[in-house]
Image: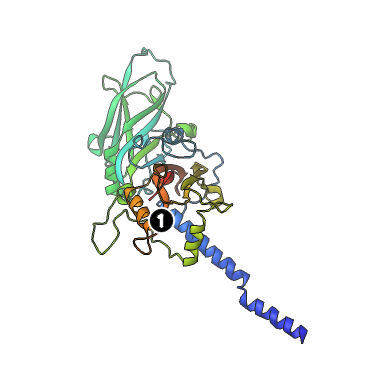
Amino acid sequence: MLAAAIWISMMGLAISRPPLNHLENESEEVRSEAIKRLLEVFGMEDPPAALVRGHKQPPQYMLDLYNTIADVDGVTKDPTLLEGNTVRSFFDKLHSDQIEYLFNMSMVAKSEKILTAELHLFKLRPQVSLTFNRHHFCQVSVYQILDSSKKNMSQGKKLLSSRLVPIHSSGWEVFTITQAVRSWMSDEGSNLGLLVSVRTLAGLQTDLKTVRFASGRNHHHSKQPMLVLFTDDGRRAASLEIVPKGSDDSPVGPSLPFPSLPISAAARRSARSLDYDESGEKMPCQRLPLYVDFEEIGWSGWIVSPRGYNAYHCKGSCPFPLGQNMRPTNHATVQSIINALKLTKGIETPCCVPDKLFSINLLYFDDDENVVLKQYDDMVAGSCGCH
């Protein structure tokens, strides 16, 4: 009888305990949903394919730009430094020894607003000794190809940018080509590439040995022709949209990137208990670390920088009376008073939440191995207060 009772008891435990594979499946579903939501925050449907980069390095220009606008954790130093919120770099697909270039713009969404486009060319020193003195210049012109069969004739191309360049100089030269990129985005089939012409001040075509730009497979990848595109994907404007007061009883405030999840009563009690420290004392509202590690998430294969960042989080209580050190809003102060006086049922104390948010910057490889710099608003809690 005792053995039977034990067996029945064990069977009861086995029946009441969820199978391990069920828990694993549930955990995997939660992880999958969490990653999906995080990708939505970063404006992506799927993560770019992880690269086995080896020799693949981001352009120095993009690294320098990232370091100019972001600190070591990726937090924006000055929001006014970057035009728009996205910078993309594209390498030439022709790899021609001629000064003709083609860039694949398919990774740019049609909805992105084109702000500025630049052609970056690395000018090499002349191969031959020249009789020109160091003050002599040549005229470098960049054309949009309109008709491949007539690209060497005036009717087959359109002038985009032209300026004087010292013949004996060496280094990067930048030309604005915004008009061409805007036309390519409106009509993908019109992207026939760019043509560069170099002439003397007398209007004569120069020899390629006289004025040369790095191109093709014979030059280091760090000097390859590059198109740099500054855009705005509209996320910043969308986050500032306000729901009109009184429309469908919707709360007034910025729209959320995704719907909130339902919270159980147990979860609310658990969240409320976080306002206490280990000794049981109430913690005042404060900012605490919350490190987001991209390697742990599984994104280190395509993110160049940062490797992670400190998002911080707000934790603690907002007891009556609220001091100025708790940075309360007027609404929070009134709510705290009503709660303390018990004037209305169900009025809780104000919550400890971020009251200042900073943006971060992400430098990464997209699916076409272009390097992209994106700025994301409201990603770091700069300070906390009672609201």
- Relative depth, front residue between 169 and 291: 291
Q: Which of 126 and 378 is in front in this view?
A: 378
**46 left or right of 191 in image:** right
Q: Compare residues 74 and 211 and report the one nearer the observer.
A: 74
Q: In the image, residue 70 lies at what x, y percent?
A: 44, 36
Evaluate whether residue 301 shows in this view: no
At a point 41% along the width and 35% down the height, the residue shown is: 77
Instruction: Look at the picture and state if 344 lies above or below 143.
Output: below
Where residue 321 sits in the image (x, y, percent)?
Answer: 40, 49
Instruction: Using the image, determine if residue 9 lies above or below residue 213.
Output: below
Residue 208: image location, x then y, percent? 38, 26
Residue 35 relative to residue 332: left or right: right
**Residue drawn at x 43%, y 65% as measured from the top left:** 262
Q: Name the residue under label 1.
A: 349
Answer above or below: position of 127 versus 258. Answer: above
In this view, which residue lies farthest toward the front?
A: 341
